[in-house]
Image (cartoon, helix red, strand yellow):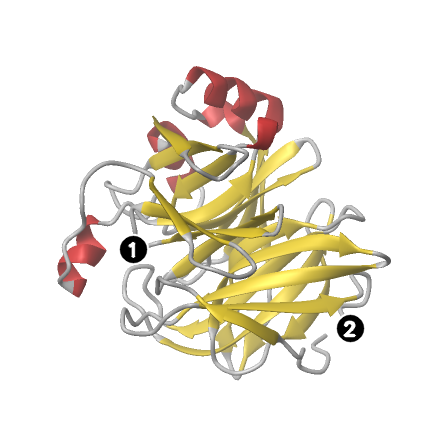
Amino acid sequence: MSLETLHLQHLRDLELSAASGLVRRGGWSFVVADDELELHAYPEVGPPRRWPLRAGELPREPAARKRAKPDFEALCPWDGGALLALGSGSRPNRHAGVIIHVSEDMSSATCEEFSLAPLHAALAGLVPELNLEGAAVWGDHLVLLQRGNGAGNRNALIRLDRAGVAAAVAARAAWTADLIRDLAFIDAGDLAGVPYSVTDAAALPDGGLLLTAAAEDTRDTYADGACLGSALLRLDPPHQVVWRQALPGRLKFEGVWAEPDGDVVRVHLVADADDPTVRAPLYVTTLDPRSGLRR
C-alpha cells in the first residue's frame, strides 16, 4: 500500500521538544507538547505566544517530569473558535481535558479544565493499555485515537457523540461512557516488522480523515523506543484505510493538520524527538487527498 516517500518543507524549529498536537488558524500554528503545561502559538514569522493550560510547574529532571506530566497528547479545534487539549489517560494523573479560548488579537487565552476520568475508565476496559494520542472533529463525531504501541495492543478509532461532548464541555462536566458511539480497531501496517501506531488525526475537506502513525520500536506505552519512521494514512468513514504514505527520515510525527488549497490540501506536521535537548520541527507539504501523492 505504501507509495514513494513524501517531500517535506521545513518551516521552523519550535521552542519546545515533545510536540504532540497541532491546530492551524489564521496563519498561526497552535501546538501542545506532552511534557509541557502550556499551549504554544507560532506565527508564520516571529516569536511564539504561550499560555498556561493549568497552574504549576513540572520537574526539570526528565524521569520526574515524565511521571508528573498531564500528558496533553491531543489538540483539536472546537465550537466557537475554541480548542480542546486532551490527556492520554495512560496514567492516573493523565485524565484531564482543557477548553481553551484564545482572544482574536492573540493577546490572551482562558483555559478551563474538566475531567476525562469516567470516559477513560470505560475505554480502558475495551483496549489492553489505554493511550489516547489524537483527536479530531469528524462529521457528527469527535474521534479519539488509541495508539497501539503497548504489549498486545492495537490501534483503535473511538467515535464519541459530538452533541453530547458539546453539552459536557459547555457545562465543564466530566466526560462519561455514554458519549461512546463505537470503537473499531485499525491495521496501520508496519515498517520493517515494527507496527505503525497512530499518533494524531485531522479532518480532510472531502470527508476523509488524515492520520499520522509512527513505527516506534517499543512494546510499552510508557517507555520510549527507537523510531524507524512515520507515515500518513487516509481513512474513509467509518474506518477504512485507503492509502498509506511514508514520511522521510526517522522522525516520530505526532501532530498533523490539513487545510484546503484549491483541489489539494496543505498538510502541516510536527514531530517529537523524545529528547528535551532537540527542538521539535514544523513541516508542510501539499498532496492530493484522494491518492496521497504530493502535488
Q: Residue at x 36, y 51 (%)?
A: 129
Badge 1 vs badge 2, beta-carbon distance below 8 Å: no
Residue, disc 2: 293
**Image location of residue 149, percent across then percent down:** 42, 63
**Image location of residue 246, percent across then percent down:** 63, 76
Mark 2 secondary-structure assignment: loop
Residue type, mark 1 in image: Asp
Residue 168: image tag? none
Residue, disc 1: 35
Mark 1 secondary-structure assignment: loop
* Vertical side of 29 occupied by 195: above or below: below
Q: Residue at x 49, y 18 (%)?
A: 170
Q: Residue at x 62, y 46 (%)?
A: 26
* Residue 56: quarter of image: top left
**Image location of residue 6, percent across then percent down:** 67, 78
Residue 70, can we see it? yes
Look at the image and tell me in which quarter the C terminus lies.
Answer: bottom right
Look at the image and tell me in which quarter the N terminus lies.
Answer: bottom right
Residue 161, can we see it? no
Q: Residue at x 54, y 79 (%)?
A: 191
* Residue lying furthest right: 263
**Image location of residue 273, percent across then percent down:** 37, 72
Q: Taking 101 as reference, is 59 left or right? A: left
* Residue 123: quarter of image: top left
Residue type, mark 2 in image: Leu
* Vertical side of 270 occupied by 131: above or below: above
Q: Taking 258 as reference, is 253 left or right? A: left
